[in-house]
Image (cartoon, helix red, strand yellow):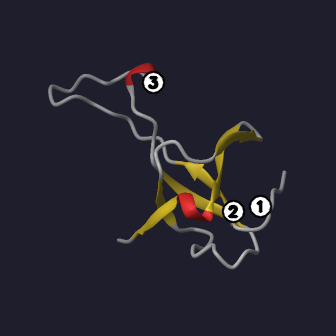
Amino acid sequence: MKFKPLGDRALAQIIEREEKTESGIVLPDTAKEKPQTADIVAVGDGEEVKVKEGDTIVFAKYAGTEIKLDGQDYMILDAEDILGVVED
């Protein structure tokens, strides 16, 4: 299924990382904090969106709308909720 965000929005796929304590215990999903990094999958045609497809971004903690497409979790984010791009 294809999805094109409208206006100043971007579609991002959430990056899930396995979290461990310092002693090596793997934390269950219920104990993890909400992830704040994602990969940009699609970008709307608004002028405020400063990211492109393929960028890894950091977004505000309680931002966006979570959706599920083809069994994958995604977020629709407003341009103002994207805090920055992760550079290698």
| Residue ranking furthest to the left | 23
Circle 2: is it few (<14), some (14-19), or many (20+) Cα within 10 Å? many
Task: Name the residue carrying label 1.
Answer: 5
Residue corresponding to mark 2: 9
Q: Is residue 87 above or below residue 36?
A: below
Q: Which of marks 2 and 3 is nearer the N terminus?
A: 2
- Quarter residue 32 falls in: top left
On the image, numbered disc 3 is attached to which residue?
29
For residue 7, which quarter of the picture?
bottom right
Give the residue at x 62% y 55%. 12
Q: Dot 3: what SS?
A: helix
Q: Percent position (x, y) of residue 45?
A: 76, 74
Nearer the camera: disc 2 or disc 3 = 2
Along the horizontal axis of the image, is 59 left or right of 4?
left
What is the secondary structure assignment of the residue under circle 2?
A: strand
Amino acid type of the residue that numbered disc 2 sits on in the rendered structure:
Arg
Amino acid at pointer 1: Pro
